[in-house]
Amino acid sequence: MTIGLLKEPDHENRVALLPESVKTLTDLKTKVLIEEGAGQSAFSSDNDYTQSSGQTVSRQAALSADMVIGINPPTDSEIEALKPNQVLLCLFQPLSNKPLVEKLQELKVTSFSLDNVPRTTRAQSMDVLSSMATVSGYKAVLSAAASSPRFFPMFMTAAGSIIPSKVLVLGAGVAGLQAIATARRLGAVVEAFDVRAAAEEEVKSLGAKFVKVEGATDDTAAGGYAVEQTDEYKAKQQALIQEHATKANIIISTAQIPGRTAPVLILAETVESMQPGSVIVDLAASTGGNCALTENDKTIQKHDVTIIGDSNLPSSMPMDASKMFGKNIVNLLKLMIDSEGELNLNWEDDIIANTCVTHDGDVKSERVKNILFQTETA
C-alpha cells in the first residue's frame, strides 16, 4: 500500500507525520510518498524524510496514493479527483460538514476523520483531539501570561508584595486541565468550571477550586463529551460565571460541544465589568467562541480587556504537536495495516468502525449518521 503525506496550507505549521513516524510506517512494509516541503514548517526537511525511507514527490503524486494523509482536508477540486476506494485520513469535522460527508459518500471514498476517534481507554493512544488539546491548554496560558500586565506568581520584593494572578478556566476537558496545571505551575490562583460532574475531582487534584453549578443534565452516556444543557441551567451558569469572571485577571475558555456552536459563557456585559488589563484566551473561537466578543484568529481589545481568539494554538508549537499527531496516526494505522503492508479494515473493531465516516458509498460512523441524518431517518 502507498501512503501519501500532504503539505498543509500556509496557515498551518504542523505536518501529519514527522520523519520518525514515516520510518515506522515503512517498517510496516508500506511505501510513503511525501509531498515536497511537507515538513518544512515543522523543521523537518525533505532530506530528513528520505533518510527515514520516505520518497519526496509532487502533490499530485501524493494525492494519487492508496491512502492520503493530512491534518486539513485537501481542496474541493482535489477531493473531486479522488477515486473510489481511495482512503482519505485527516481532520474534517464531519458533524459540522455535511456537504463534505455527502461528497465523499458520492465518490465512494473511504474516509476517516481523526476527530471521530472514540473517547475510550483503548483509543487514547490514537486520540488527536486530546493530544492537540494538551498543546492548546499549555500554550493558552503562556499566551495569556505574555499579554497580561501582571505577574502570575506571588512575589515578595523590596518594593513590596505582588499578589498572584487569578485565573478562571472554563471547561475542564484535556485543554482545560492542561491550562490549570500550567497556570498553577506559574503560581496563579486557579478556579475552573465544567458542566461534567466527573471533572470536579480532576480539577481539585490539580490544586484548583471547582466552580459548581447545580442541576446539570446527566452526561454519563455522552462518551466523555459535554452535552447541551437546559435554559434554566444556562441562566444559573451565566450568573455564576459572571460573578467569578469579574474577579479574574485571566480567563481561559475551552468549552465546546461536538457538532454545535460553542456555548456563550462570557457575555459582552461581563467583559465590560472585568478588571482593566484582564486577558481572555478563547480556544473555542472557530466554533463561535465562548466569549460573545471573540473574533476568530484575531486578538482584540474591548473595555481594556484583551481577547485572544485562537483555535489553532497547536500550530504555534509545530515540532512537538506534529510528533504527538503523528504518533496518534501511526497507532491508528497499526489497526488497519496487515503483515504484508496492505490495507485490512476490520469492521468489527469499534475504533475503525467509529472513526470511519464513509466507505463504499455508505456512512459508516453511527455517531455521524445519527447526528447528521437523524431527521431524514426519523
Image (cartoon, rainbow, N blue to C red):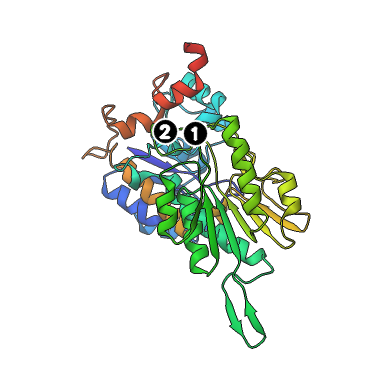
10 Å crowding of disc 2: few (<14), some (14-19), many (20+): few
Residue 100 visible from this viewpoint = yes
Q: Residue 63: x, y in percent?
A: 47, 37
Up-down relation of residue 367 to residue 378 (above or below): below
Depth check: give the residue in front, 107 or 208: 208
Q: Given contact means CB atoms under 8 Å apart, are the residues at marks 1 and 2 in contact? A: yes
Seen at 61% across and 47% down, the residue is 241
Looking at the rendered structure, the secondary structure element under dot 1 is loop
Residue position for label 2: 222
As drawn, which residue projects farthest toward the front? Answer: 214
As drawn, which residue projects farthest toward the bottom? Answer: 158
Q: Is residue 326 left or right of residue 289?
A: left
Q: Residue 371: x, y in percent?
A: 48, 23
Residue 13 visible from this viewpoint = no
Depth check: give the residue in front, 86 or 146: 146
Q: Give the residue type that dot 2 points to.
A: Ala
Q: Is residue 348 left or right of residue 199?
A: left
Up-down relation of residue 264 to residue 371 (above or below): below
Q: Residue 31: x, y in percent?
A: 34, 44
The quadrant where residue 306 appears: bottom right
Circle nearer the N terminus (1, 2) = 2
Q: Give the residue type that dot 1 points to.
A: Val
Determine the CA span between mark 1 and mark 2.
7 Å
10 Å crowding of disc 1: few (<14), some (14-19), many (20+): many
The quarter of the picture where the N terminus appears is: top left
Residue 113: which numbered mark, if any?
A: none
Seen at 71% across and 48% down, the residue is 270
Residue position for label 1: 227
Looking at the rendered structure, the secondary structure element under dot 2 is loop
